[in-house]
Amino acid sequence: MIRSIAFGCLVVVVAACSQSTERVIVAAGTTLVDSGVIDLVAERYEETHPGVQLSVVGESTALILELGRQGAADMLLVHAPEQEKEFAADGLAVQTSHVVESRFVLIGPSELKPEFEGLSSELALEHVIRLEQPFVSRGDRSGTHDKELSLWVAIGADPHRFDWYVETGQGMGPTIQVADQRGAVTLAEYGAFLAASETISLVDLDISGGGLSNPYTGYVVKGTAHEALASAFLEWLVAPEGQDAIIDANIELFGEIVYQPVGSG
């Protein structure tokens, strides 16, 4: 059985795993963890690879890359391309593969949808400024946070100067909950939004245009005790068997393909 674990518990997990070479620590973005998809995929892998156990750590990309630098995780699944460049350039990964791609959505109170539907991301954020609409940001150096900041930069705005702009410093799930409580707008990863949709009143505002794609890349960390096992898992993820597992997880959780596996269409 897969257990998603927080960063603060990782030391305990690593200590518990120290007597086994068969457990792989997979550090993944909270978007993948909160959506439920990574746990289902990892469970499928365990079913077909007896003796291998996967422990999933959900954190922001910044913390995940730091885990990789410390050798505290065997494989990373992240979605902040600019942050990843330095990690890769430092030679800290022995294997890299693009695994899946999802998309970002702007979510907010349902009464705002007629005003935002069909707007580009740039026009939508400009409208947020005009309305002085409360906006909740993750503010945690995650891939979602990086994307959000890039959208503000694209319109030449610094959101930190607005008193209606709030940073949670938390993951995707808690940030969506805070936005819901405040009746605010936030940028969310689509799968994490769908996973939370039954417990919140916020809706997808259906903004349009390009620039909202969300690619996830897997990195096998160089020099960990379980490097070979991590490589085997990453190779499986991008092979037909792993792609089928990703598709099945999508259908089970969402009834549609939210996380598009590489090479599946």
Image (cartoon, helix red, strand yellow):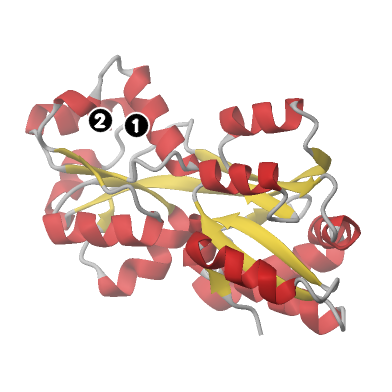
Corner quadrant of residue 190:
bottom left
Farthest residue toward the top?
156
When the figure is inspected, residue 202 is found, relative to residue 18, above or below; the finding is above
**Which x, y percent locates residue 221?**
78, 47
Labelled pair 2, 1 in contact (Cβ < 8 Å): yes
Q: Is residue 216 left or right of residue 99?
A: left
Amino acid type indicated by mark 1: Ser
Mark sitting on residue 84: none
Name the side, left or right, on which 26 lies relative to 238.
Answer: left
Question: Compared to 16, does 136 lie above or below?
Answer: above
The crowding category of the residue bearing disc 1, from other C-alpha atoms within 10 Å (few below 14, some 14 to 19, many at least 20), is: many
Mark 2: secondary structure: helix
Residue count near mark 2 (Cα–Cα under 10 Å), binned few <14, some 14–19, many ≥20: many
- x, y (%) of residue 30? 49, 57
Residue 256 image point, x, y percent: 55, 66
Number of numbered discs overlaid on the protein picture: 2
Q: Quadrant of residue 133?
A: top left
Residues 129 and 47: in front is: 47
Residue named by callout 2:
125
Give the secondary structure at mark 1.
helix
Residue 41 makes an appearance in the image: no
Q: Residue 121, which numbered label? A: 1
* Residue 229 in sight: yes
Q: Which amino acid lies under the numbered mark 2 shown in the image of this protein?
A: Leu
Q: Residue at x 59, y 77 (%)?
A: 3
- Residue at figure coordinates x 33%, y 47% from the top left: 169
